[in-house]
Amino acid sequence: DAGVTQSPTHLIKTRGQQVTLRCSPKSGHDTVSWYQQALGQGPQFIFQYYEEEERQRGNFPDRFSGHQFPNYSSELNVNALLLGDSALYLCASSGGASGGIPYNEQFFGPGTRLTVL
Amino acid sequence: QKEVEQNSGPLSVPEGAIASLNCTYSDRGSQSFFWYRQYSGKSPELIMSIYSNGDKEDGRFTAQLNKASQYVSLLIRDSQPSDSATYLCAATALYSSASKIIFGSGTRLSIRP
């Protein structure tokens, strides 16, 4: 049973550039949520995708955008990168009919470490 | 005001003892609660979820929920060095998958031999 996968593992960008991060959800899951985790902090909710639409959004600027594809995989795009965007970006999947497991349990991928110079 | 609060620690517990981790939340509409374990440099791993008042046990882990006091705790019995990690408490308002999870900042737990 494949878990949540993310790519790339690490990424180094410079200020002003744009970045795209990718996520494939756990088998059977249809909902993808993205989080940003700064060092020493808990994950902060960016947004959530379901049925190819953004269903909820946290307090992040419009520079952060996303997409979900028909196969439930998702992308996170960040434009005009700032130094403060350096963080671990986490994708979590949930949902689907998983044999009694509550739909709202979220399982994280390994994350993408983004460094902005 | 943070929505989910945890003591950042570090909490140092001798091997074999019980580690007690605590969390409070401010949103009375919160319905579901989670404990995640995060090793340094790794992503969070779900270890417990709890939805009803009372205790829920899974192996060496026991989650406790008191909605009246807006309090969640995690007990780890027979603590092992491999339990040394940051433990994240999280809450959400919904039972469905349409739920953004609010995380605390985490408590660092250190199990000393």
Image: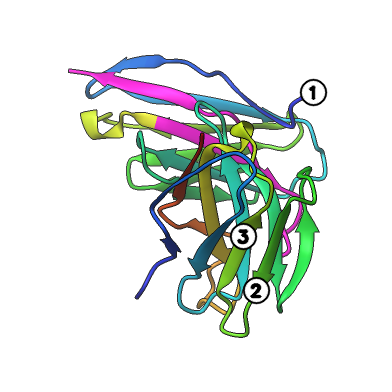
For the residue pair A62 and A17, the one nearer the viewer reads as A17
Q: Secondary structure at mark 1?
A: loop
Please state the horizontal and vertical placement of residue B8, each as a whole percent of the image.
52, 19
Is residue B26 visible to us here? yes
Give above or below for A15 relative to A104: above
Q: Chain of mark 3?
A: A
How far separated are the C-alphas under marks 3 and 1?
Answer: 28 Å
Give whichever of B34, A63 is nearer the camera: A63
Q: Amino acid at mark 1?
A: Gln
Residue placed under numbered mark 2 in the picture: A68
* Residue of label 3: A76
Can you identify the residue that label 1 sits on? B1
Magenta stretch containing residue B102, yes or no?
yes
Judging from the image, what secondary structure is the residue with disc 3 in? strand
Residue at point 38% right, 53% down? A9
**Residue A85 pos. (x, y %):** 61, 38
Q: Nearer the viewer, mark 2 or mark 1?
A: 2
Q: Quadrant of residue A29?
A: bottom right
Q: Which residues are magenta?
A: B86-113
**Chain bearing mark 2:** A
Residue B5 relative to residue B12: left or right = right
Kind of residue indicated by mark 3: Leu
What is the distance, in whole Å, between disc 2 and disc 1 at their CAs?
A: 32 Å
Query: Is the residue marked by circle 3 packed among few (<14), some (14-19), or many (20+) residues within 10 Å?
Result: many
x 51%, y 64%: residue = A22
